[in-house]
Amino acid sequence: MFTQTQIEDLVDLLYTLNSNTKVYLGCDSVRYFKNKETWARFATVAIVHMNGNNGCKIFSNISHERDYDLKANRPKMRMMNEVQKVCALWNQIGPFIDEFNVEIHLDINTDPRYGSNIAAHEAAGYVLGMTGIEPKLKPDSWAASFGADGVAHGKAYNEYGR
């Protein structure tokens, strides 16, 4: 997930901030084709909202994995991989951020008209069980829906994301 340098930079930043700081964790993915196979680019982010009013810093990790979902419009496996990655990030940095308000955002729609809905209940339960944090789903999951999405699509950059 995050490199040792990213964790050190995140911790160094957090030590300079006050208790109004919030940390948002999220993950999003993009499907693409490579050599006639379906792949997914996963972007996992930790967004630090500094002191509640001093802007944000995005820490991110990008990984590429095969996408084995048989139906592109019902991406349950890919959604659950996003959930697993955000929980892995929590396990990795949780001890360093436990004194701050932390939210976990999932880019999963609760509306049954959308394909990601297929994983909504299972994903929310997994996050709650693994982290003790009730996750935010669409439309309240901006860290995943906009932050991680931007990194996954190459629209948001930082020193770690590419």
Image: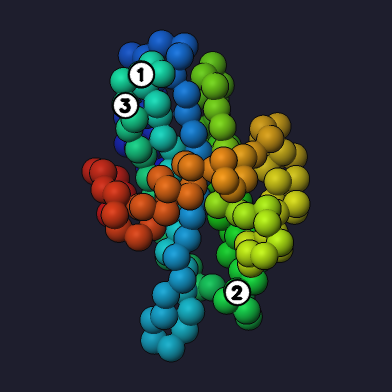
Looking at the rendered structure, the kind of residue marked 1 is: Asn
Q: In the displayed image of the protein, which residue is found farthest to the bottom?
A: 36
- Residue 136 x/y as whole percent: 62, 40
Q: Earlier in the sequence, mark 2 or mark 3?
A: 3
Decide if residue 1 is on the left or right side of residue 99: left
Q: Label 2 to label 3, Cα distance in Å?
A: 35 Å
Decide if residue 25 is on the left or right side of residue 123: left
Q: Which residue is mark 2?
A: 73
The residue lying toward the viewer, choosing from 6 and 100, is 100
Q: Quadrant of the C terminus?
A: bottom left
Q: Label 2 to label 1, Cα distance in Å?
A: 39 Å
**Helix, strand or loop under label 1:** loop
Q: Quadrant of residue 72?
A: bottom right
**Residue 119 appearing in the image:** yes
**Residue 15 appearing in the image:** no
- Residue 51 x/y as whole percent: 38, 16
- Residue 33 x/y as whole percent: 41, 80
The residue lying toward the viewer, choosing from 160 and 103, is 103
Q: Which residue is mark 3?
A: 55
**Helix, strand or loop under label 3:** loop
Q: Earlier in the sequence, mark 2 or mark 1?
A: 1
Looking at the rendered structure, the kind of residue marked 2 is: Asn
Q: Which residue is mark 1?
A: 53
